[in-house]
Amino acid sequence: MTSALLLLADGRFPAGGHAHSSGLEAAVAAGRVSSLSTLESFLLGRLYTTGLVTAAFAAASHHAAAHPATSTAAAHPAAQGAAAAHLATPSGAVEGGSVPRLGDMECAAGSEVLLQLDEELEARMASPATRVASRKQGAALLRAAKMVWPGDGYGLLPQRRDGVHHAVVLGVTAAAAGLSCAEAALIACYSQVTGQASAALRLLGFSPYDIQRLLAQLAGQCDAVAMAATAHAGKDPAELPMFSSPLADISAELHATWEVRLFAS
Amino acid sequence: MHPETVHTHPDPNVDPHSALHHHGAFRVGIGGPVGSGKTALVAALCRAFAGELRLGVVTNDIYTTEDADFLKRAGVLDPQRIRAVETGCCPHTAIRDDISANLAAIEELEEELGQLDLVLVESGGDNLTATFSRGLVDRQIFVVDVAGGDKVPRKGGPGVTAADLLVINKTDLAPMVGADLSVMERDARARRGDLPTIFLSIAQDRQAVKVADWIRALLAHEH
Ligand SMILES: Nc1nc2c(ncn2[C@@H]2O[C@H](COP(=O)(O)OP(=O)(O)OP(=O)(O)O)[C@@H](O)[C@H]2O)c(=O)[nH]1
Ligand SMILES: [Mg+2]
């Protein structure tokens, strides 16, 4: 499913990401990022904290959507395959009977876990501004995902007017696109790092070649963090990683009060 | 062919370029280069439609709140009816390639204020190539100004050639900058064919009467 992976990971996928610097604008204004080496430190610091956390939540959300049956002890293991096939199939494309539908119990278990994941991720974000940004991006991704990969799986997501956290929507979207859990985690890490790097390019006028070289150098670590995050799929949501960076939380709060800012976060 | 077997298109007059169908307010995008008078036009339309239409405004200034704050200060529209969208240094992306934040802002306005008749979406000042996605707006107005030089219509670009309405603003400045309005009119017609062009001085016409009338005609056609 490589093409679907590239499509969802592409910065051109219309899910609102271009308006977010994920803390980079605030770090630039504070003088903490001003050169390629300080940018590298920033990207790595965020990759191993929020990057790992959001990737773990994306993987766990993918798992909850694709294998809701394993989310409860009572569930029937045979439902797992059905769930995955069901999510990868646009609704209405299958005539009744040819592919088993998700049972009510599996659906209920899946939505319960996704609700917990959304709440657990909320608890890991100290900054209200960061929560808002994450929910807004989740809502934007869901809007695009439903049109690009239609399916019933989105119905498992909590109903919230302010949006579900981006990582949770990402996991469910990846499942709907037929991607794997590991690919959901990889997109979370990759889009965080590339989104911040692209904001740095726009704010600091780096050479695009320098930025791409830096991203190429970080690729191995990005893969490694995604792999570590994938291992958390299927765990109790409360047990997922909880790294944070207090300075980023404080900066996000300050950023939200600026009168003049270029990025939404 | 026997009359009964004639295969007719369900709607033979349908415009293949027409906007995606959506419920809710009629949406008009206002784009154009920096400083050409987009916010001034929004303010003029707010004055023109006060008490007549239920209005909402979404702004996309590169500096988040600049346009929204101007409209609030000008007192032409209740601040509740104005939403500002951040564009991350890419005003054209927010109106064309990735319209999600603008769609969300319009939906928020409609949710909070109830049914609206008209939503104006002002793009951040950009260049001559910026246009709105048909997924975001029903019609778009491109605003250029006389002070930018009478060569602008000749240069063309998708804004000038394809916008549903071209507004050439600040005609009051023409003598000061040595711009020839007849040249602009001729070039605009050459570029735009039958599409309309309106010359305007918002400084003198505080309600942009001709533009307001153009929108009224569209709304009447909608209903
Ligand atoms: N002389 C003259 N000045 C005008 C006219 N219309 C607008 N202006 C002035 O032009 C300047 C820019 O107008 P705005 O409405 O802010 O332009 P804008 O296109 O919204 O600008 P950005 O949002 O920054 O791209 C302001 O100082 C207006 O007062 C006009 O018809 N004549
Ligand atoms: Mg303006």
Image: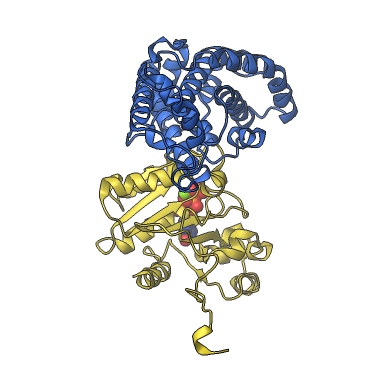
Q: Is residue A258 visible?
A: no
Q: In the rendering, at what x and y percent does residue A85 appear? A: 51, 34
Residue in front for this viewpoint, A163 or A201: A163
Residue sticking out furthest to the bottom: B2
Residue in front for this viewpoint, A65 or A198: A65
Image quadrant in which the N terminus of chain A is located? top right
- Residue A98 position (above or below residue B19): above
**Residue in view at x 40 percent, y 30 percent:** A135
Q: In the rendering, at what x and y percent does residue B9 appear? A: 51, 75
Q: In the rendering, at what x and y percent does residue A142 appear? A: 45, 38
- Residue B222 position (above or below residue B4): above
**Residue in view at x 34 percent, y 31 percent:** A158
Q: In the rendering, at what x and y percent does residue A238 appear? A: 38, 12
Quick check: A251 left or right of A115?
Answer: right
Residue in front for this viewpoint, B101 or A180: A180
- Residue B212 position (above or below residue B62): below
Residue in front for this viewpoint, B170 or A157: A157
Q: Which chain is blue?
A: A
- Residue B131 position (above or below residue A33): below
Q: Is residue A106 visible?
A: yes
Q: Which chain is yellow?
A: B
**Residue in view at x 32 percent, y 56 percent:** B55
The quarter holding residue A115 reads top left
Q: In the rendered view, how is the structure colored?
A: by chain
Q: How many numbered marks have been drawn onto this rendered protein structure?
A: 0
